[in-house]
Amino acid sequence: MDASAARAATWLRSYYFARALVGAAWVAAAATIGTHVPAAAATLLVAYPAWDAAANLIDARASGGLVRNRTQALNLVVSSLTAAAVLAMLGNPHAVLGIFGLWATLAGLLQLATGVRRWKSYGAQWAMVLSGAQSALAGGFFGMRALGSAVPGIADIIPYATFGAFYFLVSALWLSFRKPAR
């Protein structure tokens, strides 16, 4: 592996660890204060897609720019619009969950595409591909739940965010312990 490829792999591993850490912190905050304090839940619900937008921007810039990383550029737009839509609809929990459903589907498909694109260069992307596919499926579940009569809340998002953090951790660990290509 040449020095440039090694730096890129190190960046990706660090990025995945950061995504796992922030995801786990979000889950902990959502499960504790977010389920009991409506203002905290509102902040966390907006922050989740906003963080995804920021993370995609940071990673795309570190990985050659937005033009070179079109799936992440599109994910940046989708996640930014999602954060704004969630903020606008905070008084309507069904709409918020529906927005999360649409976002999970789109962001999942974009993450899947990013993982497939990176597979050849870095390997260890199977967890990102699986995560993207699962996110897209979860989006459909959120959409169906949003149409139901039960009032949804942040607790509905916690399992989704937990799996996201887990997949980023698995990817980081996989990159950490894989044998480098020769």
Image (cartoon, rainbow, N blue to C red):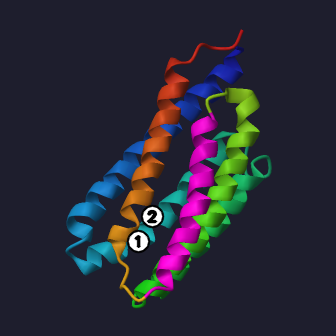
Give yes or no for residue 131 being in the magenta stretch.
yes
Tag 2: amino acid: Tyr
> Do callouts 1 and 2 mark residues in contact (Cβ within 8 Å)?
yes
Residue that mark 2 sits on: 48
Q: Is residue 53 visible?
A: no
Q: What SS does tag 2 mark?
A: helix
Q: Which of 80 and 101 is in front in this view?
A: 101
In this rendering, would 78 be left or right of 83? right
Disc 1 crowd, CA 10 A, few/some/many (<14, 14-19, 20+): many
Disc number placed over residue 45 in the picture, else none? 1
Tag 1: amino acid: Leu
Q: Can residue 73 be seen in this view?
A: yes
Q: Examine the residues drawn in magenta and state their main secondary structure.
A: helix
Picture coordinates of residue 137 (x, y %)? 59, 61
Residue displayed at 73% across by 49% down:
113
Q: Which of 150 and 161 is in front in this view?
A: 150
Q: Indicate the quadrant containing the N terminus: top left, top right, bottom left or bottom right.
A: top right
Give yes or no for residue 80 being in the magenta stretch.
no
Q: Indicate the quadrant containing the C terminus: top left, top right, bottom left or bottom right.
A: top right
In this rendering, would 154 be left or right of 51? left
Picture coordinates of residue 177 (x, y %)? 50, 18
Residue displayed at 44% across by 50% down:
163
Picture coordinates of residue 109 (x, y %)? 68, 57
Which region shows up in magenta? 125-148
Picture coordinates of residue 10 (x, y %)? 56, 26
